[in-house]
Amino acid sequence: MSVTAQTVWNNCLLFIKDNIQPQAYKTWFEPIVAVKLADNALSIQVPSKFFYEWLEEHYVKLLKVSLTKELGETAKLVYIIKMENTYGNKQPFTEKIPSSNRSAVRSQNVDVPLNNKNRELRNPFIIPGIRNVKIESQLNPNYNFDNFLEGDSNRLARSAGLAVSAKPGGTSFNPLLIFGGVGLGKTHLAHAIGVDIKDKYPEKTVLYISAEKFTQQYIDSVKKNNRNDFIHFYQLIDVLVIDDVQFLSGKSGTQDVFFHIFNHLHQNGKQVILTSDKAPVDMQDIEQRLLSRFKWGLSAELQTPDFETRVSILKNKLYRDGVEMPDDIIEYVAKNIKSNIRELEGAIISLIAQSSFNKKEINIELAKQVVEKFVKNTKREVSIDYIQKIVSDYFQMDVDTLQSKTRKRHIVQARQLAMFFAKKLTKASLASIGSQIGKRDHATVLHACKTVDNLSSTDKQFKKYVEDLTKKLSV
């Protein structure tokens, strides 16, 4: 019976799984695909150059032992790295790199150079008429690595951030995409990387910008007919940090221009750092060619911090603010506020303020009062999926029915209400809302919102629907 690549790799995986942590196995080995077995060489396909380099640096001994057990001392491992071409050509680049050959030549994506005549570039960050060629970083020095405490929830993202700041554009973490829920420190970490790079490499041009502001600048450049200046300006940056990149959802023009800027920076060894509230695989209405680029480097998730990390964050904040607080109170706050770091620090600030203004001693009783009010008054982040579920349950139908093409009045109204609340309670664009609620376009969402407003003021029963759902969604 002939041995297949899959059989060999499955046996290797069994050995590897027994010798590393479950999370490491899931991150670094589950995405690998066995491709072929020939001349005692096993070829495996990995998602990016980053994977290849990380495996070689951290798991080469483990891989060697596991493969030798299966194929003997003459066993070889070949990495196949697939990368999508930049323009038109559907055939992906394929790189074959033997595990023993780190200096193998790697294929480069080719970008179309933009017209770059010698002329003065307009800086979108300065007021027109004021001559200033200096590019300010827009970084907040208060967000640094010293006050971004490490824990299990952020270790990978923080370590990758430190690697990038030590060698911007020179690691496989390019782009570095940091993603996670609200208040978990994405913006803090993005600033910290930029601040550290500026300290180590003062000559480098570092720029932090939100995706929303980037979009507005692009719209302005189109209106003023200086789109090329806008592109050229961003091509001058050594380290570009774009916050909340999911905001580009549904904005095809901005995505197109960012695609060209990204390609130029990446191919010229410049560093790109992105933050998002979701992983690339979950992003709606972002072009596939852009999503594929987001996956070239590392996507690192910031998760909800565990209890020990929450305690450390609070102690660090109190130390920086010069405030002393008993351990039992710190632990009480950390135990009861789990959702995100922003809420955690907010609760401590409220506790200090209550104590100071009311001249009360900080004790467990005061902590209970503050935490109770804080948790009660904190608005929960609402997703479009959650809104659809609540609306569907309210009208006693399933989500598939809500999203269906039917024109039955009660289903149409339910769908319109879901769109209305999605616009009201999330930051998603109209195009993104329409895409997620039955694959409609932005015009349908706009019409739905207007219809809900009109019916709320003319139809008593419909007004009750809105009031009931508002209560349910604000719990």
Image (cartoon, rainbow, N blue to C red):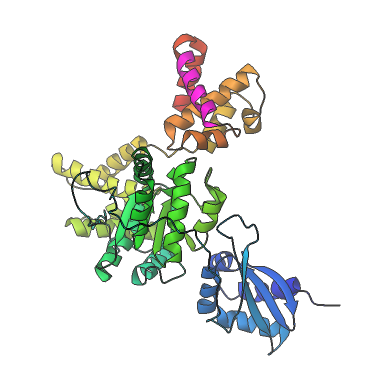
Q: Where 261 sits versus 250, above or below?
A: below
Q: Residue furthest bottom?
A: 73
Q: Does the magenta segment cover residue 451?
A: yes
Q: Is residue 464 left or right of residue 116?
A: right
Tell me if I can see residue 209 in this picture. Answer: yes
Quadrant of the image containing the N terminus? bottom right
Tell me if I can see residue 331 in this picture. Answer: no
Q: Where 296 sits versus 336, above or below?
A: below
Residue range of the region highlighted in magenta in the rendering: 441-455
Quarter assignment of residue 270? bottom left
Q: Which residue is at the front of the view, 84 or 155?
A: 84
Main secondary-structure element of the magenta-colored stretch: helix
Question: Which residue lies at the image location 52% right of the left edge and 59% below the top edge?
Answer: 295
Tell me where residue 402 appears, x and y as whole percent: 62, 28
Q: Does the magenta segment cover residue 290?
A: no
Question: Which residue lies at the image location 36% right of the left edge and 64% below the top edge?
Answer: 150
Tell me where residue 95 appears, x and y as whole percent: 61, 72
Tell me where residue 307 appears, x and y as whole percent: 39, 57
Q: Is residue 238 left or right of residue 134?
A: right
Q: Which residue is at the front of the view, 423 or 240?
A: 240
